[in-house]
Each structure stands twice: as structure tokens, then as C-alpha cells.
Amino acid sequence: MIVRLFAYDLNAVQISGLTHLNRNTVNRYLLGIRKRTAESCEKASPFQGEVEVDESYFGAKRVKGRRGRGAFGKTIVFGIFQRNGKVYTEILPDVSKVTLQAAIRGKVNLESIVHSDGWRGYNGLVGVGYSKHLRVDHGKNEFVNGKSHINGIEGFWGFAKSRLGKFRGLKPSGFYLHLKECEFRYNHRGENLYDCILKLIRENPLF
């Protein structure tokens, strides 16, 4: 019952009310389910074909005077989106060239066509083997350049932020699992999410 209600995207309070189970018991099950979905996401195979890469910032509202990359007090999330496919997310300490290149090389096949914006952190991808790197310059209000754009990963950012916004006061310690839950839900959109979660649990029980 808890798994089905989780698949319907109900929160712990709602599930507790419908099942008449103790809130702590419900939270323990939800934590276990989120761990299994996160483990599934981390096993994602290298991405290939046409791939979009981008970073986004999650957390408290922007502090006045601090904009864009480097916004104070926010969590940096890097994302990879395979067009007509799945998304992968990773929390990063910064958006330097070294950090971004390491994240990309860990998940994107060298033969891929990589689309990014004009951020300098993406400089040098050709030099490390990504000979097909196309860019759009958001700084010049350019959002599409021929076939190059990052609308797919930006669509996921919108989905994730909208969904996470309902968890008011989400603790930093729980952010990773909630982020991965968004990733799992997005990657299985159009599928029976309940069946997908049951399969994970049968393969690796919660307790």
C-alpha cells in the first residue's frame, strides 16, 4: 500500500493518514524506497548520441546581489540529458572546468554530440575527446543555434524544482535522495511507476 501511494506521489503525512500507520514507520519505508530509486539511477549506462549538459542551483531564494553561477547558499546540481531518453543528475562542489569535465567524462560516451551553453567551464571538451561540442550563448539571449539547444535538460530542471518546491523546509541531508527521486520519476514517465518500484524492491528488499 505504501509503495502504491508513493508511486502516486503522496507525501508522508498523506500516506500516514490513509494507511493509519505511524508517521515514523511511513518515513522509514519512504527512505528505503528512495534509496532503491537512487541506486537505480546511479547505475545508468554511459550516455550517447545527442546529449545536453547543464548545471542548475537548488535551495533558498537568491541573496540580493548574488546572481547566476556562484549564487550563495545554493546546491549545485549538474545534469545530463540524452535526447529522447533519460536524465542523470549529480551534486557538484563547483562549476569549474575540471569538475564539469570529470562529471561529463564519467557518464558521456566520447562519440556523443554534446550540447551546452557558453559557460567557460565547458571550454576544452574538444581537447579531452569530445570532438562534437555545440553551444548556445545564453549571455547573448541565444537559446537555439541551429540544432543546438539545451531545452531538454532545462525542462527537467523545471520539473524538479516544481516538484521539490512542495517539500517546504527540505533538509540538506535529504536533498540527494529527493533529487534522485525526481530523476527516477522523470526517467520512467509514461511507465507504470508502481511496477517499476516493485521490481526494484523484489531485486533488493528494503530491509
Image (cartoon, grey):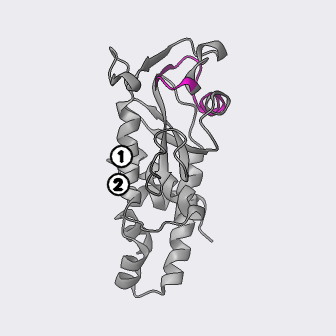
SS state under label 2: helix
Where is residue 153, by image quadrant? top left
Residue 35 is covered by the magenta coloring: no
Residue 109 is covered by the magenta coloring: yes
The residue carrying mark 2 is 162
Identified at 55% across, 24% down, the residue is 120
In this rendering, position of residue 109 left or right of residue 195: right
Q: Quadrant of the N terminus?
A: bottom left
Identified at 34% across, 82% down, the residue is 18
Q: Position of residue 42 (x, y in %)?
A: 59, 46
Write down the region rendered in magenta: 101-120
Residue 201 in view (yes/no): no
Q: Label 2 crowding class (10 Å Cα cut-off): few <14, some 14-19, many 20+?
A: few
In this rendering, position of residue 149 left or right of residue 184: left
Q: Name the residue nearer the viewer: 14 or 188.
A: 14
Q: Position of residue 48 (x, y in %)?
A: 51, 25
Q: Position of residue 78 (x, y in %)?
A: 53, 39
Does 65 sit above or below residue 175?
above
Labels 1 & 2 near each other (Cβ < 8 A)? yes
Q: Name the residue nearer the viewer: 96 or 201.
A: 96
Does 144 sit above or below residue 10?
above
Residue type pointed to by label 1? Gly
The residue carrying mark 1 is 158
Identified at 43% across, 75% down, the residue is 12
Where is residue 149, by image quadrant? top left
